[in-house]
Image (cartoon, rainbow, N blue to C red):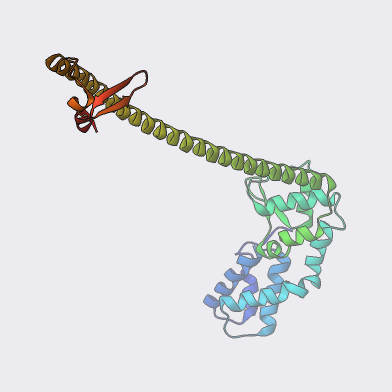
Amino acid sequence: MTDFTPKETSFLTNGLNLPDKESQQVQSWIIDWTCGHPYLTQRIFNEIYIQDKKNWSKNDVDDLIKSTFFGEKSELDSNLQFVRDKLTKDSPDLDRVLTTYREIIKARNNIADEEQSIVKSHLKLSGVVKRTKDGILTVRNPIYKKIFNEFWIKDHLPLNWKRMRKMIFTTSIAILLAFSFALLSLFAFNQQKSADRLRLVAEKAQVDAETQRDKAILLSEKLNAALAISERGKKDLVQKQNEMGASRLTPKSIGKVIPVNTDNYKYYVPAFFCNVLF
């Protein structure tokens, strides 16, 4: 049996004993839940008729549907039990039927109907899905979608070792890749630390070398100055000897003489020259 259209359910509003406008509003709220499913729609109208309320709000209708079909009541309803048995006990291939139904629920990709598909034909026969005008399979109504949801599928889906092995393999690869990436990151971090340490050592060595070079240059300049003064002292001493005569030149006549050592020579320099140098 095909689903009722809103026009086809209008006759059911006559038994609600409500004003026309309110009856039409209640009818719209019911159709939102049942999508015109013959059994579910008539069942809700009957429950409203039994309660014989004078006023109905959307929340009232929602609460009535939940108390009628959801929870423990879903186990007692004959139509819901029929759908449940078709999806499980009478299924030609339980794993494929529930897996395909789960794909339809998720609706990430449109699942096209296939007349030759035993699984899809069985899903339509169970009444849980229907074919749209575009040839796409969709869940028949929100009541079915809420009762036979992903949690229900998970509870009834048999353990598929092939799928389980695939999932374990995929998870293991992901963990291995993550672990490898962590090791590479740690290695790169240690290499960077080593490079930074070597760079600091090289910079310190360069600074030390430049300091030693500057000291050597300063010392060389001092030695060159000392040698220059020593040479002038020798010339002055020779000149003084020539003036005074070699026979009269004594240490007392030229003052105290102080020895000055260089790398290759040893000179005796008058003390008054040393005062200039040192």
Count of number-bearing discs: 0
Query: Where's residue 122, x and y in %?
Result: 80, 51
Q: Residue at x 62, y 45 (%)?
A: 134
The answer to whether residue 112 is seen in the rendering is no
Q: Nearer the viewer, residue 216 or 54?
A: 216
Left-right relation of 77 to 54: right
Query: Where's residue 158, x and y in %?
Result: 84, 54
169 is higher (above) or lower (below) than 62: above
- The quadrant in which residue 230 appears is top left
The answer to whether residue 53 is seen in the rendering is yes
For the N terminus, the image quarter is: bottom right
For the C terminus, the image quarter is: top left
Query: Where's residue 139, x and y in %?
Result: 68, 56
Left-right relation of 226 to 103: left
Query: Where's residue 176, x and y in %?
Result: 70, 42
Q: Residue at x 60, y 66 (%)?
A: 32
Left-right relation of 105 to 218: right
Q: Nearer the viewer, residue 185 or 210?
A: 210
Toward the left, the furthest residue is 243
- The quadrant in which residue 13 appears is bottom right
Q: Nearer the viewer, residue 278 or 108?
A: 278
Q: Nearer the viewer, residue 183 or 252?
A: 252
Toward the front, the furthest residue is 247
Q: Residue at x 68, y 69 (%)?
A: 41
148 is higher (above) or lower (below) than 200: below
